[in-house]
């Protein structure tokens, strides 16, 4: 259904044909659909209300009722007509527009008067649809239309074809004699050999001796040269995959074709070219399993369709799992996060095709890996692959201690209410957890053995068992198929075991008293993470051996304000090849510490982010960084003092050029100067020149030398539960500047591309170091030391030494301030030493004000409200 306006002009929103797949003619008819005023139901507001009873709207949904109404009028006039006959009358007597093809308007705009009592009726179309390319000579194709003489007299009907149809490509039989009240068939013949490639369309008009007419559409879409690509798919079990998602890339033309579905055989008709295919293949879990058995990335680097058809097989039985294998780590590990990618590109690297998969692994039995493949031949572009994985201390570990001792493979949901400590439980079998199963059972202080066919969607059953008094829950699958756990609202420890372990545990419980030991940690105390990159295809062996010495140790502290909270942690990784990093956030208990072992390989860099909560979160990110094997460093997240920072790798954060100024302190940071907030704060500016406020920020700077003060006020746009510190930071950047005369600032043109002269402004940036607990608290009434580190932006060439510093502290959010002693540490750092107020003499928080200046008079004053908490 198409739509036109009151002048029969086709609406811009009206869909055009041909139909995807078979190139059939669509739409078949149009009707008024622009600015249509129609009745509206009370209380509705669709479109533009005209008054209490009517609204105006545009769309094919407004055109459709016009055609439905026309059909109703014809049905009223001819109650014996079938729906097909009514449709034929409307299309055969629609009014076509000369400016539009049949693929735009079909038969034309509906014309009720012409269709109401037609002398000639016509059914059928001369739509030849898609004419597939073939070698050699095409066979002719025919279509038949039927003309009916509705008058009381015989007549001669003469056919005529008009449109952009080459001579002889479409011919029609006739004229035909049609007796009164009878019908006759007219044959339309297509000779594809005479048709041009692409779309051809027109109109077949039948005219009676008395001048009555009826018409129908003529159309065909002749393919350019095509070859058939046949791809067979087998999953890891040699069966039909549960799902395949792939992208086919033309290596010369950059043409893309995607497929997403389940099939064992895919046939595609494609222009002659060389192609590449990348994708993911999923293996069925069996039966009605929600979780797949495996998901694997694959690539077919080169498919040659330049001269003939091609046939190939994507064989999932050859797939292998990737494993970050730390050979000398004897402590238990579970896979946490994974991200696997393949990228294909032509020789000139003008574009690329990437496919991959990423996710969390600890909640599911699904396997993840890749199908091995060799790289393209030399001179045929490249195939990059990257495999990232993190493996951590399991958050839950379990074993049977009675009657025999053996370990259990415990898997749990990301939504587990985490706990610290070791517990032992006697196990009680609660069957399927029905009310009848639970009746009369004493579960106090015991673990319930719960048998379910699936866990996703069975949260109410698990919560019912908890409500019955279970101190812990062991989930046992009743069918041998992969499982996944997404369970919310359960507060006691719970975990699932594989099918075989569940059978053994069930037999033990049935035989007599059975006890398990369960160990939990609020957050893993150690984790390994790393990415391997190849430009030689996908290796056959993806279990890569490594040693602890191949990693750098990062002692990571995840701070939280006043109380622990659950947030997210993401580590993006980039290897020597320019591939995109796609990662999944892992749940993180903040207010904890962890040893993160980062694989340190040449060209491998990381960038982590921490989200303060799982909802309504603040995100803190870091600059890209690499590591050296065997080294040990420290990292703190959300530690005090939270304040604006300058990302070290940013180009020209404080620069003045002949075409503009950059003044870009990051929007919030913490104790690490490489960290900055991605969102969560709101910033306002005030500008002063020689002490006078400038309200037009486009006129702040003048060519002559002047004193400037730029004041940023950063406030939290909204309160975040558990995030109490650094709610307001006011920074006064004072400096002297004149128009630049040289091009001394490195990276200036990347920040200000049209600059011809550019110099770094003498802005002083402040950072802080102090000791606080993981909950960002300092004991009230005790001594504290806060070190203030002053620095300049990259490219500053003046005297970098700071002349002095002041420091003040407030315990009432800045209503009153107390100056404290400051000692110089080195040329750019100062330490403030003082005794914190007692809790009774404070509001529970300490605010700080730092002021640092250089010998030229440049000065920065920064006030941080609630820099840390007192306890």
Image: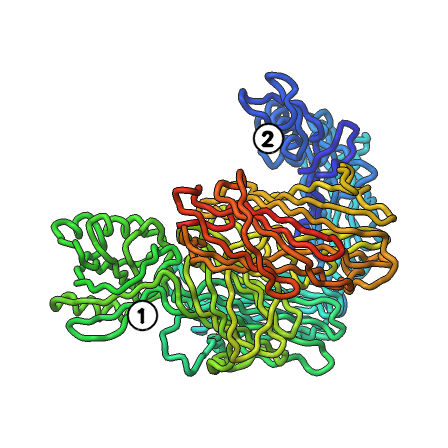
Q: Nearer the viewer, residue 77 or 186?
A: 77
Tell me the residue at 62%/35% (across/down). 85
Image: 590 above or below 265: above
Q: Nearer the viewer, residue 644 or 365?
A: 644
For the question of whether residue 571 can be seen, the reply is yes
Q: Residue furthest top?
A: 52
Whole-percent x and y of residue 536?
Answer: 62, 81
Tell me the residue at 60%/16% (across/down). 52
Asked whether the residues under the numbered discs 1 and 2 touch, taking CB atoms below 8 Å apart as contact, a structural biologist would say no
The chosen color scheme is rainbow
Q: Nearer the viewer, residue 440 or 163?
A: 440
Q: Nearer the viewer, residue 193 or 422?
A: 422
Image: 102 above or below 662: above
Tell me the residue at 56%/44% (across/down). 728
- Position of 320 with respect to 764 (left or right) is left
- Which residue is under mark 2? 81
Q: Which mark is residue 409?
A: 1
* Cα gap from disc 1 to disc 2, whole angstroms: 71 Å
The quadrant holding residue 70 is: top right
Whole-percent x and y of residue 97?
Answer: 80, 36
């Amino acid at each position: 259904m198409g739509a036109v306006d009151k002048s029969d002009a086709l609406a811009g929103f009206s869909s055009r044909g041909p139909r995807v797949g078979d190139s059939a003619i669509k739409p078949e008819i149009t009707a008024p659909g622009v600015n249509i005023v129609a009745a509206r139901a009370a209380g509705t507001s669709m479109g533009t209300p005209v008054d209490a009873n009517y609204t105006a709207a545009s769309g094919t949904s407004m055109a459709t009722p016009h055609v439905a109404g026309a059909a109703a009028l014809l049905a009223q006039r001819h109650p014996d007509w079938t729906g097909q006959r009514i449709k034929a009358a409307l299309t055969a007597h629609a009014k076509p527009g000369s400016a539009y093809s049949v693929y735009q308007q079909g038969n034309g705009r509906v014309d009720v008067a012409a269709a109401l009592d037609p002398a000639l009726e016509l059914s059928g179309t001369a739509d030849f649809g898609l004419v597939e390319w073939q070698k050699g000579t095409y066979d002719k194709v025919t279509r038949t239309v039927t003309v009916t003489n509705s008058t009381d007299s015989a007549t001669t009907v003469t056919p005529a074809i008009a449109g952009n149809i080459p001579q002889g490509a479409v011919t029609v039989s006739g004229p035909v004699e049609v007796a009164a009240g009878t019908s006759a068939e007219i044959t339309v013949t297509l000779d594809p050999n005479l048709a041009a490639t692409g779309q051809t369309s027109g109109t077949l008009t039948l005219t009676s001796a008395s001048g009555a007419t009826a018409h129908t559409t003529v159309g065909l879409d002749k393919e350019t040269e095509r070859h058939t690509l046949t791809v067979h798919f087998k999953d890891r079990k040699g069966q039909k995959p549960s799902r395949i998602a792939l992208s086919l890339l033309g290596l010369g033309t950059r043409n893309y074709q995607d497929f997403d579905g389940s099939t064992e055989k895919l046939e595609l008709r494609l222009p002659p070219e060389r192609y590449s295919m990348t994708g993911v293949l999923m293996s069925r879990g069996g039966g009605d399993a929600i979780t797949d058995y495996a998901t694997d990335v694959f690539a077919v680097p080169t498919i040659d369709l330049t001269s003939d058809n091609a046939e190939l097989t994507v064989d999932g039985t050859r797939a292998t799992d990737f494993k970050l294998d730390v050979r000398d780590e004897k402590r238990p590990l579970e896979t946490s996060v994974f991200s696997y990618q393949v990228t294909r590109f032509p020789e000139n690297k003008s574009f690329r095709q990437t496919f991959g998969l990423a996710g969390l692994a600890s909640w599911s039995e699904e396997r993840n890996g890749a199908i091995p493949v060799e790289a393209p031949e030399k001179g045929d572009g490249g195939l990059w692959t990257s495999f990232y994985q993190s493996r951590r201390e399991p958050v839950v570990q379990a074993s049977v201690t009675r009657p025999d001792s053996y370990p259990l493979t415990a898997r749990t949901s990301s939504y587990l209410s985490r706990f610290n400590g070791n517990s032992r439980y006697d196990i009680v079998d609660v069957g399927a957890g029905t009310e009848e199963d639970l009746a009369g059972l004493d579960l106090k202080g015991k673990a319930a053995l719960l048998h379910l066919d699936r866990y996703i969607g069975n949260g109410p059953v698990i919560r019912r068992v908890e409500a019955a008094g279970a101190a812990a829950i062991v989930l046992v699958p009743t069918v041998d198929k992969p499982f996944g756990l997404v369970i919310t609202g359960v507060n006691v420890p719970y975990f699932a075991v594989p099918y075989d372990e569940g059978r053994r545990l069930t037999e033990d419980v049935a035989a007599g008293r059975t006890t398990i030991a369960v160990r939990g940690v609020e957050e893993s105390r150690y984790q390994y993470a790393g990415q391997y990159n190849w430009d030689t295809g996908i290796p056959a062996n993806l279990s890569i051996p490594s040693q602890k010495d191949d990693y750098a140790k990062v002692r990571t502290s995840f701070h939280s304000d006043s109380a622990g909270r659950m947030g997210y942690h993401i580590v993006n990784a980039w290897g020597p090849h320019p591939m995109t990093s796609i990662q999944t956030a892992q749940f993180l208990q903040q207010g904890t510490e962890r040893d993160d072992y980062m694989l340190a390989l040449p060209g491998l860099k990381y960038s982590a982010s921490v989200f303060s909560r799982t909802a309504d979160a603040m995100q803190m990110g870091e600059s890209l960084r690499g590591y050296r094997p065997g080294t040990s460093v420290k990292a703190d997240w959300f530690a005090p003092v939270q304040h604006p920072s300058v990302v070290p790798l940013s180009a020209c954060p404080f620069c003045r050029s002949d075409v503009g100024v950059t003044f870009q302190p990051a929007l919030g940071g913490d104790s690490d100067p490489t960290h900055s907030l991605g969102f969560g704060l709101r910033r306002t500016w005030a500008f002063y020149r020689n002490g006078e406020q400038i309200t037009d920020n486009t006129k702040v700077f003048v060519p002559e030398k002047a004193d400037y003060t730029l004041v940023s006020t950063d406030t939290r746009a909204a309160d975040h539960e558990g995030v109490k510190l650094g709610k307001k930071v006011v920074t006064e950047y004072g400096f002297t500047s004149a128009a630049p005369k040289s091009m001394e600032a490195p990276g200036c043109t990347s920040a200000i591309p049209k600059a011809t002269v550019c110099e770094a402004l003498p802005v002083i940036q402040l950072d802080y170091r102090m000791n606080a607990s993981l909950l960002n608290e300092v004991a009230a009434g005790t001594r504290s030391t806060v070190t203030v580190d002053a620095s300049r932006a990259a490219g500053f060439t003046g005297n970098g030494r700071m002349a002095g510093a002041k420091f003040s502290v407030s315990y009432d959010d800045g209503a009153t301030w107390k100056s404290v002693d400051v000692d110089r540490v080195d040329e750019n750092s100062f330490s403030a030493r003082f005794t914190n107020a007692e809790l009774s003499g404070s509001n529970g928080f300490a605010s700080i004000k730092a002021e640092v200046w250089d010998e030229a008079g440049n000065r920065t004053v920064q006030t941080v409200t609630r820099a840390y908490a007192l306890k």
